[in-house]
Amino acid sequence: MSKSLTLLLGAAVLTLSSAARAEAPLNVVASFSILGDMVENIGGEHIDVTTLVGPDGDAHVFSPSPTDARAVGEADLFVVNGLHFEGWLDRLVEASGYAGPVVIASQGIDALSFDEEREEHANHDHDHDHDHDHDDSHGADQEHGPEDPHAWQDLQNGKRYVENIRDALVEADPAHADDYRRNAGQYIEAIDALDNKVQQRIGEIPEANRVLITNHDAFGYFANAYGLDVLSPVGLSTAAEPSAADMAKLIRQIQERDVQALFLENMTNPALLEQLADETGVAIGGTLYAGALASDGEASTYLGMFKHNVDKLTQALDD
């Protein structure tokens, strides 16, 4: 083979290798399933997504494995919720050796203070419960920071998540910036349309019935955005356990407010809600999705999760 032909073939191989690298999808790791779905919607065919806490998984009690650390260490981009939702985040990043961008999807949202939420619920309870014995026993909430991390439960916050993810993908992969912007724009339009529908459907529930009781306090943003009151046996962490006084007080509130239904969550133990149902005679109205998507079916996407939850709420509360 001639020297010129050898050089020509070598140049062709280098060109093909460079093109292959250029077309290799961006390797993105998302901390939990809701973020994974958002990233996939925005990134499309230009990314590969690995989700650490998968469908029906509980990020509150998640313990990263060596495989998870390896996935993060090999990532081009790591997308997390922030607001101390991932209590294991710093340890995982250190163990993985990851030195790339960490995208805080909740960056820029107007975070709700958990103390303010608790005070608001307590003040509302004064109208219905004249035992002023509001205790502060949810010690496990200290796993979180002072702010409620479940910000995606307001669809308007979901739009900010999408914008932050879009901007991070554009910066990491400018060659496909137009696609990321187009996908994000279409996604935001769908979020706005669904937000209007949720407002309408929740607004049709009689005001006295708009009381949401679930296993743990993950629906503060949803309640704030769409006009419900939230009561729960425990606080923000699924690892918390209610005291006997908490349970007794909640039973009184359920009876005094003529609560229509209780709601399970897909990633929590149903025992507490089943106990409440037995002691109050209030039926369980179905399973809601708060911090994790379903493995299949309608609630396996962020928007589908909202549709599912609103269907369950209106069916059980709109009497």
Image (tube, helix red, strand yellow):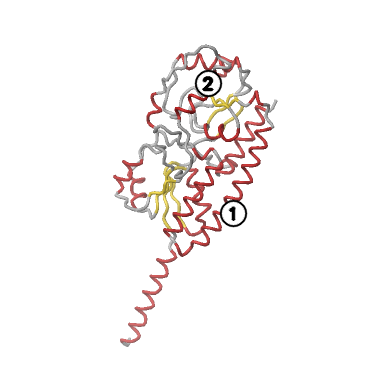
Please tell me in which quadrant of the rendered image residue 262 appears.
top right
Q: Residue at x 41, y 55 (%)?
A: 27
Residue that numbered label 1 is attached to:
186
Task: Tell me which label, 2 or 1, sits earlier in the chain.
Answer: 2
Residue that numbered label 2 is attached to:
123
Q: Residue at x 66, y 41 (%)?
A: 197
User: What residue occupies the far top of the structure in this picture?
Assistant: 131
* Mark number, residue 159: none
Between 5 and 94, the one nearer to me in the picture: 94
* Number of residues whose C-alpha sits closer than 10 Å to that of mark 1, classed few (under 14), some (14–19) or many (20 or more): few
Give the quarter of the figure containing the N terminus.
bottom left
- Position of residue 41 measured from the top left corner of the image (x, y, whole percent): 53, 52
Q: Is residue 318 left or right of residue 26?
A: right
Q: Amino acid at mark 2?
A: Asn
Q: Is residue 181 above or below residue 262?
A: below
Please tell me in which quadrant of the rendered image residue 213 appears.
top right
Between 38 and 149, the one nearer to me in the picture: 149
- Position of residue 60 measured from the top left corner of the image (x, y, whole percent): 41, 34
Give the quarter of the figure containing the C terminus.
top right
Q: Amino acid at mark 1?
A: Gln
**Which mark lies nearer to you, 2 or 1?**
2
Q: CA distance from mark 2 to mark 1?
A: 40 Å
- Position of residue 207 measured from the top left corner of the image (x, y, whole percent): 66, 26
Secondary structure of residue under mark 1: helix
* Number of residues whose C-alpha sits closer than 10 Å to that of mark 2, classed few (under 14), some (14–19) or many (20 or more): some
